[in-house]
C-alpha cells in the first residue's frame, strides 16, 4: 500500500468511526428480548412515548450500551499503548497480568470486603497499578526491556490467577455472586455503574491523547528515542501506568473481558499502520464498538439465555488472533 492509499484509508476510517459508534449504539438500543423500532427510540428522546419503551431504553439499555462503549474503549486503548511501548504484539492487559491484578483486587473487595464495593474502580486501578509496578521491578536490570516485561508479566499473571482461585475456594459460599463478573459481562449494569466508572474512563482516555508523540518515538527504538531527547524509561513507565489505569477501570465494571486489547489494535494496525495519531483513536473507537456490539448480540441472539460477553469475545477473538498468527501478521 502506497502513502496516498494509506492516507485515504486513514481519512475514511476517521470519518466512519463516529458513524460506526452511532450505528452500534442504535442497534444496542433496538434489540433485546423486546425489539424497539428506531421511530420509538426517537420518541423516547424527543417526545412522549410508551412508558414501557421509555423504561426499557432509559433504565436498561442506554446505560448498558454506554458502559459497553467505555469498557471497550478502555481495553483497546490499554492494549494499543502496551503494544506500542513494549514493541511486542502480545502486550495486552489480559496477558501480561495487568487485568489479573485489577481482577484480584476487585474480587478481594467483592468477596472478602464487600462493604468497600463502592470503591471498586479505585480498588481495581490500584490492583492493576501495583501489578504493573511489580512487573516493572522484576524486569528491571539496568533498564526494563520490553521482552523482560512480557516474561515477568506472564509469570505474575499465572501467580495472580492462582491466588484468585485460592480466595474463591476459601470463600466458596460467596463465589456465586462474582462468577458472571469473572466470565466478563455487563448483565445488570445500570446508571449507578456508569456513574462511578465514567469519570475514570473519560480522564484515562483523554490522557491517552498526550501519549501519541511519545508512543511514536518509542517505536523507533530506545537508542533512537534517546538521541531525539526522550526520557525512554520514564515515558515507558508513565504509559504503563496509564494503561493500568484504563485496564483497571474496565475490569471494575466489565469483569475479565479478554482479547479486546489484543485483537482490536492489530486489526486497526493492519489498516492504518503504526502511526499513533491514527492507531490510538481508531483502536479506542473500534474497541468501544466491538464490546457494545458483542454485548447486544450476547443478550439478544441467545434468548432466553444471556451469554456473558467475555465468553463471546473469547470465542471470536481467539480464532482471529490465530488467523493473524498464521498469516504472519504478528511476531
Image: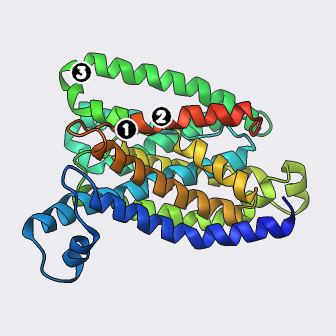
**154 displayed left or right of 251:** right
Mark 2 lies on residue: 314
CA gap, disc 3 and disc 1: 20 Å
Above or below residue 106? Residue 35 is below
For discs 3 and 1, the disc positioned in front in the rendered view: 1
- Which residue was labeled with disc 3? 171
- Secondary structure of the residue carrying tag 2 is helix
CB within 8 Å, label 2 to label 1? yes
Residue 318 percent across, percent down from the top left: 55, 32
Does the CB distance between marks 3 and 2 fall below 8 Å? no
Residue found at x 71% / y 56%: 271
Location of residue 52 by image quarter: bottom left
Residue visible at 80% across and 53% down? 219
Question: How many neighbours does mark 2 have within 10 angstroms: few (below 14), some (14-19), or many (20 or more)?
Answer: some
Pinpoint residue 171: horizontal percent, then vertical percent: 24, 21
Point out residue 13 in the picture as x, y percentages from the top left corner: 63, 66
The local crowd at label 1, few if under 14, some if 14 to 19, many if 20 or more residues have their Cα within 10 Å, is: many
**Sequence-first disc among 2 and 1:** 1
Q: Nearer the viewer, residue 285 or 171?
A: 285
Of the 4 image quadrants, the one containing the N terminus is: bottom right
User: Total marks drawn?
Assistant: 3
Question: Position of 147 compared to 80: left or right?
Answer: right
- The residue depicted at 20 percent of the width and 49 percent of the height is 33
Comes first in the chain, label 3 or label 2: 3
For disc 1, the marked residue is: 184
Question: What's the CA distance linking mark 2 and mark 1?
Answer: 10 Å
Q: Secondary structure at mark 1?
A: loop
Q: Position of residue 120 (x, y in %)?
A: 32, 47
Q: Residue furthest left?
A: 51
Seen in the picture, residue 247 relative to 216 is either above or below; the reply is: above
Q: Nearer the viewer, residue 13 or 147?
A: 13
Q: Assess disc 3: are there few (<14), some (14-19) or many (≥20) residues with their C-alpha within 10 Å of its C-alpha.
A: few
Amino acid at each position: 500500500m502506497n502513502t496516498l492509499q494509506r492516507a485515504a484509508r486513514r481519512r475514511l476510517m476517521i470519518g466512519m468511526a463516529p458513524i460506526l459508534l452511532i450505528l452500534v449504539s442504535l442497534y444496542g438500543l433496538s434489540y433485546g428480548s423486546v425489539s424497539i423500532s428506531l421511530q420509538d427510540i426517537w420518541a423516547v428522546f424527543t417526545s412522549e412515548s410508551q412508558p414501557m419503551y421509555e423504561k426499557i431504553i432509559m433504565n436498561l439499555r442506554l446505560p448498558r450500551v454506554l458502559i459497553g462503549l467505555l469498557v471497550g474503549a478502555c481495553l483497546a486503548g490499554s492494549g494499543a499503548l502496551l503494544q506500542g511501548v513494549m514493541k511486542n504484539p502480545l502486550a495486552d492487559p489480559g496477558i501480561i497480568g495487568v487485568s489479573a491484578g485489577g481482577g484480584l483486587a476487585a474480587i478481594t473487595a467483592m468477596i472478602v470486603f464487600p462493604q468497600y464495593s463502592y470503591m471498586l474502580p479505585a480498588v481495581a486501578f490500584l490492583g492493576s497499578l501495583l501489578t504493573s509496578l511489580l512487573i516493572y521491578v522484576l524486569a528491571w536490570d539496568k533498564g526494563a526491556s520490553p521482552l523482560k516485561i512480557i516474561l515477568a508479566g506472564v509469570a505474575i499473571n499465572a501467580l495472580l490467577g492462582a491466588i484468585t482461585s485460592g480466595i474463591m475456594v476459601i470463600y466458596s459460599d460467596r463465589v456465586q455472586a462474582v462468577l458472571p463478573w469473572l466470565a466478563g459481562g455487563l448483565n445488570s449494569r445500570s446508571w449507578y455503574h456508569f456513574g462511578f466508572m465514567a469519570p475514570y474512563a473519560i480522564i484515562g482516555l483523554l490522557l491517552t491523547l498526550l501519549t501519541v508523540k511519545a508512543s511514536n518515538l518509542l517505536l523507533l527504538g530506545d537508542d533512537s528515542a534517546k538521541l531525539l531527547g526522550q526520557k525512554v524509561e520514564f515515558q515507558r513507565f508513565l504509559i504503563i501506568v496509564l494503561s493500568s489505569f484504563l485496564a483497571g477501570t474496565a475490569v471494575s465494571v466489565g469483569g475479565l473481558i479478554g482479547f479486546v486489547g489484543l485483537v482490536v489494535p492489530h486489526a486497526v494496525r493492519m489498516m492504518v499502520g503504526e502511526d499513533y495519531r491514527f492507531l490510538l483513536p481508531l483502536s479506542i473507537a473500534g474497541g468501544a464498538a466491538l464490546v457494545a456490539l458483542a454485548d447486544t448480540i450476547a443478550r439478544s441472539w441467545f434468548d432466553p439465555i444471556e451469554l456473558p460477553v467475555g465468553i463471546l469475545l473469547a470465542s471470536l477473538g481467539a480464532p482471529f488472533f490465530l488467523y493473524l498468527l498464521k498469516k504472519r501478521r504478528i511476531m
